[in-house]
Image (spheres, helix red, strand yellow):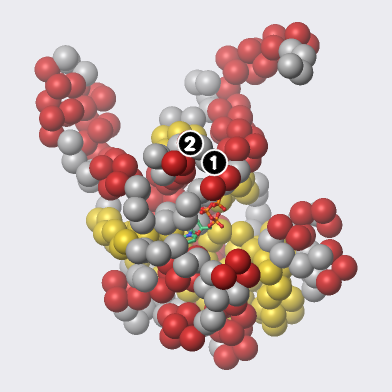
């Protein structure tokens, strides 16, 4: 099965990053050497999608400008002899076709996905939540596409979490189908550990069949008054089969200040240019730092 389109949702308020996100999209926060959203864009491209649909909202224009062409900047860089940098900047606008859908009211992730219906049409698509970064992102998505093809159903990425973390995630009720593949019998949003059907938590990568759209039109606002994707997926799991893929490798949540810091550190420490120097810096810093 060829998946041609991917959706990246970037319309949320980013309240956990306020006040920074008052005037700057969370998705444009730098993670080492590029903005958060670029990781998702590159991951989708690596999976061979032809079109990326980014759902934005008021105040997110910086995302559009970032992936747009800036002749003026390129020219200035060329005049300064910065040919390589100019080329790097130009490449950003040529990576893939990107189209933008404006979510006029932030009515929830399910609503954001639904707003892409006319562009996606009647075909399966990839959904990426840019806050979530996967160590083996390309591999995870490719495996999910294969599972979608083999089982002819939507696929969600899941990861085992600790008991303490359970109440922060959507948790699936799984029935094992194959190594790392489960059928989803039900889903519970942010349950107490004693009520959770398993310890497999939903993470921000999905391969969705287009029938999710009709279900989302019928999904009523749930937790927080928002139209929740999880509620839609629960319905989908009852009608058609939904599968979960327990991916391998680390996943980082850059959607909170501490998570963003952890992700930045993890990525920078793994970077061959920055890593060794950062490690030396931390070795020097740690023994001498006290709380203020
Ligand atoms: P979050 O729950 O992380 O919300 O959304 P948020 O607004 O990004 O951040 P906080 O919680 O206020 O700090 C999960 C994903 O759903 C998108 C977000 O952009 C993010 O990718 N989303 C959420 C929308 O696109 N629209 C919405 O109405 C809500």
At 29% from the left and 72% from the top, the residue drawn is 119
On the picture, is 102 further left or further right than 36? left
Q: Which residue does the numbered mark 1 point to in the structure image?
A: 17
Where is the C terminus found, in terms of image quarters?
top right
Depth order, front residue of 219/260: 219
* Secondary element at tag 1: helix
Depicted 77 relative to depicted 149: above or below? above
Depth order, front residue of 260/179: 260
Residue 25 x %, y %: 41, 44
Q: Is mark 1 within 8 Å of ligand 1?
A: yes
At 57% from the left and 70% from the top, the residue drawn is 225
* Secondary element at tag 2: helix
- Label 1: how many residues lie within 10 Å, few (<14), some (14-19) or many (20+)? some
On the picture, is 128 further left or further right than 250? left
Residue 247 x %, y %: 64, 59
Residue 188 x %, y %: 71, 73
Residue 241 x %, y %: 59, 85
Residue 57, disc: none
Q: Which residue does the numbered mark 2 point to in the structure image?
A: 20
- Label 2: how many residues lie within 10 Å, few (<14), some (14-19) or many (20+)? few
On the picture, is 133 further left or further right than 162? left
């Amino acid at each position: 099965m060829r998946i041609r389109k991917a959706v990246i949702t970037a319309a949320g308020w980013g309240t956990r990053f306020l006040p920074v996100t008052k005037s700057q999209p969370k998705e444009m926060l730098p993670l080492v050497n590029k903005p958060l959203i670029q990781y998702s864009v590159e991951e989708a491209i690596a999976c061979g999608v032809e079109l990326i649909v980014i759902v934005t909202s008021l105040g997110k224009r910086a995302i559009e400008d970032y992936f747009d062409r800036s002749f003026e900047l390129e020219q200035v860089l060329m005049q300064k002899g910065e040919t390589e940098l100019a080329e790097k900047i130009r490449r950003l606008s040529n990576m893939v076709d990107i189209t933008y859908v404006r979510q006029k009211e932030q009515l929830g992730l399910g609503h954001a996905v639904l707003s892409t219906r006319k562009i996606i049409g009647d075909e399966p698509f990839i959904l990426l939540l840019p806050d979530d970064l996967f160590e083996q992102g390309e591999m995870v998505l490719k495996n999910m596409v294969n599972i979608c093809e083999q089982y002819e159903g939507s696929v969600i990425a899941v990861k085992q979490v600790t008991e303490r973390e359970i109440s922060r995630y959507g948790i699936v009720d799984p029935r094992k189908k194959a190594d790392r593949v489960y059928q989803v019998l039900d889903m519970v949003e942010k349950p107490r550990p004693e009520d959770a059907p398993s310890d497999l938590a939903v993470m921000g990568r999905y391969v969705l069949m287009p029938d999710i759209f009709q279900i989302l039109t019928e999904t009523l606002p749930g937790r927080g008054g928002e139209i929740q994707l999880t509620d839609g997926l629960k319905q989908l799991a009852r009608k058609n089969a939904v599968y979960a893929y327990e991916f391998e490798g680390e996943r980082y949540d850059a959607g909170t200040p501490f998570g963003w810091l952890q992700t930045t550190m993890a990525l920078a420490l793994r970077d061959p240019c920055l890593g060794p120097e950062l490690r030396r810096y931390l070795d020097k810093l740690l023994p001498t730092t006290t709380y203020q």
